[in-house]
């Protein structure tokens, strides 16, 4: 039985598939998990889905359904030595007829070597591995491990499912809050579900906090709204929405929406996000999304970072807000980002091509005799400081055009200059 002081979200975890709300493709009639259990054999599984969608819960339920030991760890907190200890214990238990389900949360946090260490034990069936990840397994999980697991995707819980979960927790006399179904107004339950962002754990935490306040004295609608906002900010600090919020900030800046960008910036500050992390991301935005359309943006982003380091909060928050608005309002160009990506691809393809002799350094007489630097044309000695027709790529590699400036901001002038140089090349001057 769950400890009565355990958080509501922990106490209300479903104990069997019939108690699971949402995920009909997995637990409904004919669902993937239902078919797996009917087959009598539990394979290793990888659950991929957003926070609070039920990955840990389903792992516990499956272990219970097949009467296996359940060992749960987070990939953030353990290493290979701990994994080997768990495997050795599982091996002994298997000899006694007790199978083990090893649940590894955030499996994407394991590096290549750590994931490889799991392979032989999953292959032999020493443990049934159930991994959980919020990241795309195609990029974060080793292909060899992925091929040995059944990949099941969990959807974000919709509001009707969350409302069902919240109502159940409100009235459940044994594991829930044990309150009357009218202890909270019906629309408040809907508001809590909407604020949960598809995360059942988050919704139950919100419900627990607000119900506790309501039990002390009845809340006015305005007080409920204010408390809901305070709770959301506090729970955001835990990190479940962290990457979604920084993504929203970045995309608002990229979309030239300064007001929306300021909203997400303020919300992240209210949620306890480290401002220096935001400062670093703003520098990235200046390079990736503004680029040479406004070269001043990078310097302004760095200045804002430095001001915050010197002043801290709350004074330094204003400097970062200034950067947010400037970047959002600035002309946009990702030409540098695209150019670098294309150049990196070519560097892998032509990575062994030799540096042409005329471009090589020649610090010694021997190198000069070998032709290093021979026939190099010094641009400053040429008209317009430009060596018309000169080739700067490896000899076997054709000329490439990675950087394609936009017609926005300062980059428009850069585009005009490059077009002029291209005309000179075509004219053969």
Image: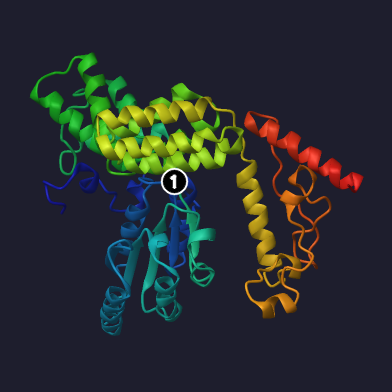
Quadrant in which residue 256 is drawn: top right
Residue 252 x, y percent position in the rendering: 49, 30
Compared to 161, does 190 lie above or below?
A: above
Give whichever of 345, 109 is nearer the camera: 345
Give whichever of 245, 224 is nearer the camera: 245
The residue positioned 15% from the left and 24% from the top of the image is 214
**Where does the N terminus fall, quadrant-wise?**
bottom left
Residue 302 falls left or right of residue 379: left
Q: Secondary structure at mark 1?
A: loop
Residue 253 falls left or right of residue 229: right
**Whether residue 228 is visible:** yes
**Whether residue 193 is visible:** no
- Residue at the limit of the structure toward the left, as seen here: 216
Q: How many marks?
A: 1
Residue 79 x, y percent position in the rendering: 31, 71
Residue 393 x, y percent position in the rendering: 75, 61
Instruction: Look at the image and name its color scheme.
Output: rainbow
Residue 255 falls left or right of residue 3: right
Compared to 93, does 148 lie above or below?
A: above
Residue 216 x, y percent position in the rendering: 8, 25
Residue 115 falls left or right of residue 81: right
The residue positioned 39% from the left and 61% from the top of the image is 109
The residue positioned 30% from the left and 33% from the top of the image is 269
The residue positioned 20% from the left and 47% from the top of the image is 11
Q: Which residue is mark 1?
A: 23
Compared to 148, does 319 lie above or below?
A: above
* Disc 1 packing (10 Å; few <14; some 14–19; many ≥20): some
Compared to 295, does 389 lie above or below?
A: below
Give whichever of 416, 381 is nearer the camera: 381
């Amino acid at each position: 039985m769950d400890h009565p002081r355990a958080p509501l979200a922990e106490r209300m975890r479903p104990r069997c598939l019939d108690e699971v709300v949402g995920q009909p493709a997995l637990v409904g009639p004919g669902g993937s998990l239902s078919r797996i259990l009917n087959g009598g054999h539990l394979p290793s599984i990888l659950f991929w889905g957003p926070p609070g969608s039920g990955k840990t819960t389903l792992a516990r339920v499956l272990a219970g359904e097949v009467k296996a030991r359940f060992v749960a760890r987070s990939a953030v907190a353990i290493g290979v030595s701990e994994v080997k200890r768990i495997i050795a214990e599982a091996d002994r238990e298997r000899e006694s007829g007790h199978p083990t389900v090893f649940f590894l949360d955030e499996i994407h946090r394991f590096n290549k070597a750590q994931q490889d260490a799991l392979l032989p034990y999953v292959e032999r069936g020493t443990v049934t591995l159930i991994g959980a990840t919020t990241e795309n397994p195609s990029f974060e999980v080793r292909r060899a491990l992925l091929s040995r697991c059944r990949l099941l995707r969990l959807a974000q819980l919709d509001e009707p499912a969350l409302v069902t979960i919240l109502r159940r927790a409100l009235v459940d006399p044994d594991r829930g809050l044990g309150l009357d179904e009218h202890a909270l107004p019906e629309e408040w339950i809907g508001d809590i579900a909407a604020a949960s962002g598809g995360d059942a754990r988050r919704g139950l935490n919100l419900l627990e906090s607000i119900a506790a306040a309501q039990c002390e004295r009845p809340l006015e609608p305005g007080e409920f709204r204010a408390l809901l906002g305070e709770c959301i900010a506090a729970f955001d600090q835990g990190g479940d929405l962290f990457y979604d919020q920084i993504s929203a900030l970045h995309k608002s800046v990229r979309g030239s929406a300064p007001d929306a960008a300021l909203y997400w910036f303020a919300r992240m500050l209210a949620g306890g996000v480290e401002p220096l992390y935001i400062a670093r991301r703003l520098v990235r935005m200046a390079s990736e999304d503004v680029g040479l359309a406004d070269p001043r943006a990078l310097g302004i982003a760095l200045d804002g970072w430095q001001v915050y380091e010197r002043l801290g909060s709350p004074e330094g928050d204003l400097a970062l807000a200034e950067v947010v608005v400037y970047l959002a309002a600035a002309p946009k160009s990702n030409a540098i980002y695209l150019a670098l990506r294309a150049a990196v691809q070519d560097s892998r393809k032509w990575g062994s091509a030799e540096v042409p002799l005329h471009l090589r350094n020649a610090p010694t007489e021997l190198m000069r005799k070998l032709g290093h630097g021979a026939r190099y044309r010094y641009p400053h000695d040429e008209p317009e400081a430009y060596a018309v027709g000169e080739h700067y790529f490896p000899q076997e590699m054709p000329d490439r055009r990675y950087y394609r400036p936009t017609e926005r901001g300062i980059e428009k002038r850069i585009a005009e200059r490059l077009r002029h140089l291209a005309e000179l090349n075509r004219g053969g001057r």
